[in-house]
Image (cartoon, grey):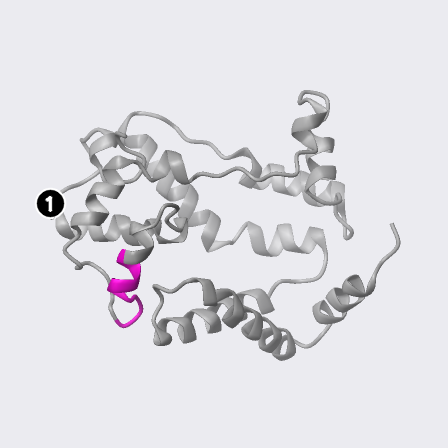
Amino acid sequence: LHPGWTDVLRVGLALSPRPVRTAVHWHRARADLADRPWVTTRGRRLLSRQLAIADGQIPLGWEAVLRRIVWRSRYFTVCTGSLAALGAAVDVAVVHPFVDPQVLDALARAGGFAGLGNRTALTDRLFGDVLPAEVVRRQSKASFTDPLWTATAREFAATWSGGGIDTTLVDADALRRVWAGDQPNLLTITLLQQAWLHDHPGSAIAGRGAGTAGPIGTRS
């Protein structure tokens, strides 16, 4: 493959001083937040700043990203911790092999600086001998809205008291409109759970069935 102008610009940005990278990512983050109407003006300002700082710290090279960013990523730490808590409630151990330090180390060494290619190339390398070619090379993207946004979630969203959120960061009326839509944005899932906990004080995951711990992914 021959590099194009976008590749040159991407490398140029990665080699720029951190303040320059942060400034560029700040402008990009502001544009990306335009499709999140539930975030207030103050929330967008704070969120775009934090996203810019995080993106500006991403190093150049596949190996460096895996070793210095992914292992320490709050995103993966929170996700794995949350799923571990949910699994523990029903006596299930949840494992995540592709964020395991040993697996990431092996991928970092195998890919080196350039990496292992795009998503299709990486999937083919890892699973090409066990998955059909049409699965490896699929162009569509999976959707997780239906399994998570069930009738239970819709019913709660319709009767939500409006409490449990930081109104300096979240516009409650805009959030209601998002939840009332045909395809609610899954980026609001944490807000939905937070609102449910507010309206159901004293509820806890521990000692309860997973289906009664909140509105997400429960009975349809």
Name the image quarter holding residue 150.
top left
Q: Residues within 10 Å of mark 1 (few under 14, many from 20)?
A: few
Horizontal side of 39 relative to 156 (left or right) equals right
Q: Which range of residues does the magenta coloring cover?
A: 168-176
Q: Residue at x 37, y 38 (%)?
A: 83
User: In this rendering, is residue 113 above or below 97?
Assistant: below
Image coordinates of residue 5 in percent, x first then y, are 81, 65
Outermost residue toward the right in this view: 2
Is any atom of residue 41 visible in this view? yes
Residue shown at the point (70%, 51%) measured from the top left: 63
In the image, residue 56 lies at what x, y percent?
59, 69
**Side of 104 where 146 appears, left or right:** left
Q: Nearer the viewer, residue 184 or 16?
A: 184
Residue at (38, 43) in percent of width and height = 81
> Would you say residue 127 is visible in this rendering?
no
- On whether residue 164 falls in the magenta region, the answer is no
- Judging by the rendered image, the residue that carries numbered circle 1 is 202
> Residue 53, position in %: x, y?
53, 71
Give me the residue at 78% from left, 61% from top.
Answer: 7
Q: Is 196 displayed left or right of 100 in the figure?
A: left
